[in-house]
Image: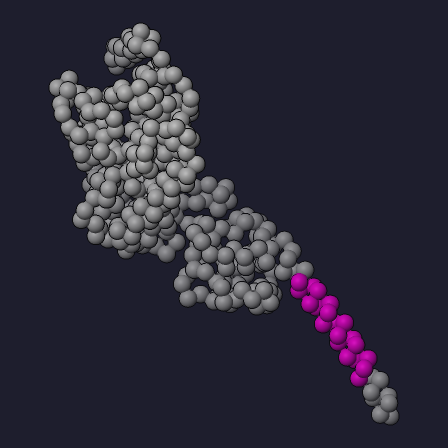
Amino acid sequence: MWRHIASNALTFLIVALFLLVGLVSWGSSQYRAEGPLDQAMCLQVPSGSTMRSVSNQLSDKSAITSPVIFRMGADYAEKSSQLKAGSFRVPENASMEEIIDIVTRGGRNTCGTEVIYRVGVNQTVVDVRELDPVSNRFIEVASFNPADGAPPEEYIAVRGSSDTTYRATIAEGVTSWQIVDALGSLDILDADVSETPAEGTLAPDSYDVRPGDKVSAIVARMETAQARILDEAWASRVDGLPLETPEEALILASIIEKETAVADERRQVASVFINRMERGMRLQTDPTVIYGITQGEGVLGRGLRQSELRGATPWNTYVIDGLPPTPIANPGRASIEAALNPDTTDYVFFVADGTGGHAFATNLDDHNRNVARWREIEAQQGNDG
């Protein structure tokens, strides 16, 4: 009898083992299989959430087939404790495994509302946009200049929301004073900077920011980034340049930045100034004259007068020899690299050509003809206006 009982028990254990293996196999396939979500969605994970609350939320939205399998999969992958707060885009038919990866990966929010503070040469613009999870594209909700008065309701409604992310985007060619002034005026930041950072030392780029961040901390990130860019560019510079230090390269790069917004022209413009320096010619560039007038604090907003072109300032390259004593703006990576790796040309002149770019010349006669054409274009544009 005991032998019969033992045989039955063994049979039962074998059957139970097969059932368990089958159940695990089925659960694993369910965990990795395409999910039931028929269109992408935004999943909000508040701070303090648990895998249980997330799995129930996903189940309520018909994004997963089983909250239990979802949680068991997270436990098995040792990711249950790695849940991140934020707003995440869950693609259509995402498997439970893919969703676990999305909510535990970290980094920036991939869904929700984004506020971008665009610091430009002429003004700061605030863009409020919201991600449409289905198309995976941002839709503009509001755009305004904070200097024009009270912000719109669309901005006020999302400011401080848990699924709102913020970025400060700094344009190339903005001065250090403009950057600090713009960041200090933003209502989400702590304006704790009283002195303007050295001109040219802040890297134009896009920076993630959070409400309550100190402007000084953001400036420090910009300074670190610019120092790294300059070090890398200086290490890979071409031989024979008339630039003795990285600081001189930064000064030249800032002039290139202010002279052209056309990416393909930067190295040509750089070659003009390098050729002038090598021949002992003055740089004679208008942006340096403007900087001598404004000191980087705001925009001149008008054309230069002849008296200003002749006026003596440390930055007026119509009067001084060589480079000015400091940069005249914060150049981007491309302009820094152009200053240290210019095109090889014989150009020593350039003037606007009416297309947004410039006409280059190797001699004064050709340059004068290019200038005459530009004057004709200016006159025609004035008549059209």
Q: Which residue occupies 29% across, 41% down?
A: 201
Position of the N terminus by quadrant: bottom right
Position of residue 51 relative to residue 240, above or below, is below
Q: Which residue occupies 76% across, 72% down?
A: 18
Task: Give the number of callouts.
Answer: 0
Q: Quadrant of residue 366?
A: top left
Residue 138 is left or right of residue 158, and the answer is right
Question: Overall secondary structure of the magenta stretch?
Answer: helix
Q: Quadrant of residue 183?
A: top left
Position of residue 215 relative to residue 25, above or below, is above
On the image, the x and y values in percent for residue 169 come to 34, 41
Residue 257 within the magenta-colored segment of the rendering: no
Q: Quadrant of residue 362?
A: top left
Frontmost residue, 11 versus 141: 11
On the image, the x and y values in percent for residue 357 come to 36, 20
Position of residue 44 relative to residue 174, above or below, is below
Residue 34 is left or right of residue 277, and the answer is right
Frontmost residue, 310 versus 210: 310
On the image, the x and y values in percent for residue 341 come to 41, 29
Colour convention of the picture:
one colour
> Can the viewer see residue 182?
no
Q: Which residue occupies 73% across, 67% down?
A: 22
Residue 106 is left or right of residue 361, and the answer is right
Q: Which residue occupies 38% across, 44% down?
A: 228
On the image, the x and y values in percent for residue 19 come to 74, 72
In the image, the segment drawn in magenta is 9-28
Residue 24 within the magenta-colored segment of the rendering: yes
Position of the C terminus by quadrant: top left
Residue 262 is left or right of residue 4, and the answer is left
